[in-house]
């Protein structure tokens, strides 16, 4: 061994990346008295508490307060300023992030999990060399290794886009001013959430979407309701748009050249936000050296137990191609944990809930009508307007509806969708019933507190149609 080669340090488990799944696996192993380490190059705790889920929801809530302030007169209030101080908005977000980082550091200390800050890459099977942030290198080998490197915002190969220095969600969360004219490439979750938030802060916002309609995987009534809310707040939607070239510099003046059904179009703005998808962080970390294969899309190849092609190596979260939600990464942790303990657990067949944090929220779990029709699954449809939920009447936030799919010949809940206030919380109740394989009657016959949003579920499931292939529209 060369005098410059570091001594190999041995661990029971090493997590490469401190995202949701990786950190929980390491904390669990270390809490059991074993030796565990987490290698993190930048964000302690991963993307969610630093630059993604929680910071964005913090900003979104500030935008909701700004929106309510502008409509204060509707609530009998007057004299409130509707100006937005983006420095204060950013400081509130930063304070939350600092608190979350401190919470993570405390957890590392209490579980006796070693946090190693630096860039890690495989140099041999189950062996990682870490270039430390503060200088020097370390060489670690583990009985088990978990790849938890996450994903990053995709920057498409469009002429001039990279040179325009566009915003991603990371830079957008750090803005200290309100963009005058914000152009957003992509109408997915990130694009829609930021579009509404910055519109409420005072930006003129245009969403550029390549598809013919936003939310292609959602039912028509859901998509049209969401679109109505966005356009009603003054957000411009440009669909069927193929971006050909970008000129200028984001933050100053930027021009996006489009092709819309053969017609060239130009859009100008002061800022450009790219929200066109995610790229797995699997390049440059020596996976080929470790015997870890990738899929054609660049994700780590895993089986239903999240085992890679290398013995003793798992992959979790975004980099493994799991649905890009923190709650799914947390379940990936449970899959790996149980398999390490000799309790077989798989990713197949699990319910995957989602929530788009617009105002109001869009939440869904299980089948929607679009998927059911595509799969040829017969169902009975229930639908309830949010105006029929008495809690919504008290707040005045009656936009939207909730809907459920029930088996055509049994009482099983096949799926649930909600577009309305507290949609994510409403979904959780239905998802629990679905997970426990309870019939819809279990929700229907529950006694929920009045007046709460959950009470609306009783109204919804009390309207079950008696004939196969029919639908019901419930009223309170």
Image: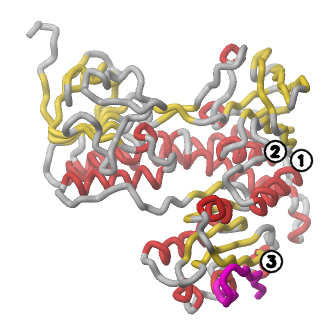
The residue under label 3 is 387
Marks 1 and 2, Cα distance to the nearest angstrom? 8 Å
Q: Quadrant of the N terminus?
A: top left
Residue denoted by label 1: 234
Q: Horizontal and vertical percent for residue 391?
A: 72, 80
Badge 1 marks a residue whose secondary structure is loop
Q: Quadrant of residue 397?
A: bottom right
Picture coordinates of residue 347, whole percent (x, y): 37, 55
Is 457 drawn above or below residue 348 in the view shown? below
Residue at left 30%, top 16%?
135
Kindly identify which residue carries mark 2.
199
Whether the residues at callouts 1 and 2 have beta carbons within 8 Å, the answer is yes
The quarter of the picture where residue 122 lies is: top left
Residue found farthest to the left: 1
Label 2 packing within 10 angstroms: few (<14), some (14-19), many (20+): many
Q: Is residue 325 above or below residue 470?
A: above
- Tell me: residue 42, above or below residue 454: above
Mark found first going from the N terminus, 1 or 2? 2
Is 46 left, or right, of 236 in this rendering?
left
Q: Which residues are magenta?
A: 461-476
In this rendering, is residue 141 above or below 99?
A: above
Q: Is residue 114 left or right of residue 66?
A: left
């Amino acid at each position: 061994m060369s005098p410059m080669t570091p001594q190999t340090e041995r661990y029971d488990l090493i997590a490469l990346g401190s995202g949701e799944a990786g950190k929980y696996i390491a904390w669990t192993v270390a809490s059991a008295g074993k030796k565990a380490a987490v290698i993190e190059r930048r964000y302690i705790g991963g993307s969610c508490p630093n630059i993604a889920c929680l910071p964005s929801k913090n900003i979104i809530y500030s935008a909701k307060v700004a929106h309510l302030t502008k409509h204060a007169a509707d609530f009998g209030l007057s004299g409130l300023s509707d100006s937005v101080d983006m420095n204060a908005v950013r400081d509130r977000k930063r304070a939350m992030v600092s608190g979350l980082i401190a919470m993570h550091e405390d957890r590392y200390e209490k579980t006796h999990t070693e946090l190693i800050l630096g860039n890690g890459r495989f140099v041999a099977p189950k062996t990682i060399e870490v270039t430390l942030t503060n200088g020097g290198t370390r060489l670690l080998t583990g009985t088990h290794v978990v790849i938890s490197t996450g994903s990053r915002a995709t920057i498409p190969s469009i002429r001039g886009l990279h040179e325009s220095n566009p915003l991603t969600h990371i830079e957008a969360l750090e803005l200290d001013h309100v963009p005058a004219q914000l152009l957003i490439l992509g109408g997915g979750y990130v694009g829609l959430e930021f579009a509404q938030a910055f519109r409420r802060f005072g930006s003129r916002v245009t969403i550029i979407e390549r598809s013919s309609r936003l939310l292609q995987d959602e039912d028509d009534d859901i998509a049209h309701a969401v679109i109505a809310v966005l356009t009603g707040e003054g957000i411009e939607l440009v669909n069927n748009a193929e971006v050909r070239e970008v000129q200028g510099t984001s933050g100053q003046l930027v021009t996006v050249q489009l092709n819309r059904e053969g017609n060239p179009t130009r859009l100008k703005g002061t800022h450009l936000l790219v929200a066109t998808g995610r790229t797995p962080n699997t390049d440059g970390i020596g996976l080929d050296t470790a015997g870890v294969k990738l899929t054609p899309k660049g994700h780590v190849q895993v089986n239903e137990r999240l085992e890679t092609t290398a013995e003793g190596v798992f992959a979790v979260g975004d980099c493994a191609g799991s649905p890009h939600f923190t709650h799914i990464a947390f379940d990936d942790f449970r899959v790996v944990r149980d398999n390490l303990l000799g309790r077989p657990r798989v990713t197949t067949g699990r319910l995957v809930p989602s929530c788009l944090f617009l105002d109001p929220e869009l939440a869904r779990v299980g089948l929607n009508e679009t998927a059911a029709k595509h799969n040829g699954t017969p169902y009975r449809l229930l639908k309830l307007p949010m105006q029929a939920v008495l809690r919504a009447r008290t707040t005045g936030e009656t936009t939207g509806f909730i809907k459920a799919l029930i088996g055509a010949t049994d009482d099983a809940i096949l799926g649930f969708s909600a577009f309305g206030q507290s949609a994510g919380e409403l979904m959780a109740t239905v998802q629990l019933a679905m997970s426990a394989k309870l019939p819809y009657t279990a929700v229907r016959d529950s006694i929920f507190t009045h007046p709460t949003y959950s009470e609306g579920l009783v109204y919804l499931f009390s309207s079950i149609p008696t004939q196969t292939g029919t639908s019901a529209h419930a009223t309170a």
